[in-house]
Amino acid sequence: MAKAWKKLSILALAAALAAMVAMVGCSSEQKSEEATDEKATTETTAEAVELQVFAANSLSKAMEEVQAAYIEDGHSNVTFADTQYKSSGELNEMLGAGSYADLLISASKGSMDTAVKEGYVDEGTRVDMFKNDLVIVSKEGSGLKDVTLQDIADGKYTFCVGDESVPAGNYADQALSTVGVYVPSGDDEGKTGKDISGKKGAFAEGYNPVLDTSVGNVCKHAQSGDVDVAFVYTSDVYRFGGVEIVGTVPADTHKNIVYPGAITSQSKNVEATQEFLDWCQNSEKAQEIWQKWGFELA
């Protein structure tokens, strides 16, 4: 009888232990499921936000890739409206006319200075994002090489530059003023190179460049052979293809080419915009993309 009771006690103890193990297992599993559910809930309830970006035309290819990478990199709640790629002057005009944007990225300090002065952006959020170089390009296979500013001054080639609304055109005009092709006026009269704005002047007699409203279009004139050479950014060679660099404009003949970014004063998504702006500058993924398209980080 004692042996039977002993056997029953052992079986009861074993059953109790098994029940305890099962309860612990269920508790752990439940906690794991609750943690998973909590994470899923957090991800699905993150506030959806749509950002409107106004960016200089030369950023188009790189920015599209950066925006896609940003969403994939843990920001699935963010979408981007139809990003507007225009000349920096046109972007300012759009903001001045009441168009909505969260972020403005300009291709020149001067254009961003205007945006600050007119109250289009929050100056406290302004930051220099990229640098670029001004180069002379021709269509692929043209056979041209080592083209200089003096060659342009000597009338050896037809050429295209951006108009006054295009920062790349302003930089080109500054450079061309050092060889007498572009003649500054107004406050810039008597000055040349980086000391002038590259606006409101005129081309000297005998020079009739093709002018266009975006650096992208300027590049296309060279690509098609409409002109012998064009003045564009290094990044445009990566962006469009079909052209080759045949000369580099000396950096001391024009102002530094810098792309400033700033959150607009009208943005309804300041926190989300700042997070995207920070990611554009600090993420290794973003840096790889910018460099891939020919932009140097400022």
Image (cartoon, rainbow, N blue to C red):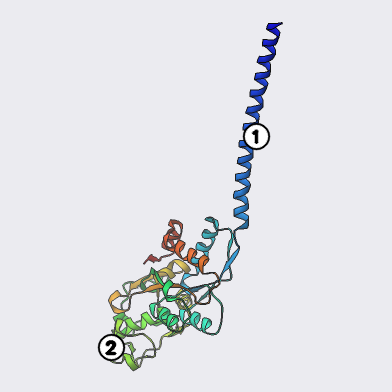
Q: Position of residue 52 (x, y in %)?
A: 55, 71
Q: Amino acid at mark 2?
A: Lys
Q: Quadrant of the C terminus?
A: bottom left
Most foreground residue, 237 or 93: 93
Do we see residue 227 in this rendering? Answer: no
Q: Residue at x 68, y 18 (%)?
A: 12
Q: Residue at x 43, y 85 (%)?
A: 164
Say above or below: 57 vs 292: below
| Image quadrant where residue 176 sits | bottom left
Most foreground residue, 206 or 274: 274
Q: Quadrant of the N terminus?
A: top right
Do we see residue 282 in this rendering? Answer: yes
Q: Position of residue 288 (x, y in %)?
A: 43, 58
Judged from the image, the secondary structure of the residue bearing numbered disc 2 is loop
How far apart marks 1 and 2 lie (CA) works out to: 81 Å
Q: Which residue is mark 2?
A: 191
Judged from the image, the secondary structure of the residue bearing numbered disc 1 is helix
First reached walking from the N terminus: tag 1 or tag 2: 1
Q: Residue at x 55, y 72 (%)?
A: 268
Most foreground residue, 30 or 4: 4
Q: Residue at x 40, y 70 (%)?
A: 127
| Image quadrant where residue 284 sits | bottom left
Say above or below: 150 vs 246: below
Q: Closer to the camera: disc 1 or disc 2?
A: 1
**Any mark on residue 44, and which?**
none
Q: Amino acid at mark 1?
A: Cys
**Any mark on residue 26, and which?**
1
The 10 Å Cα crowd at callout 2, few under 14, some 14 to 19, many 20 or more, is some
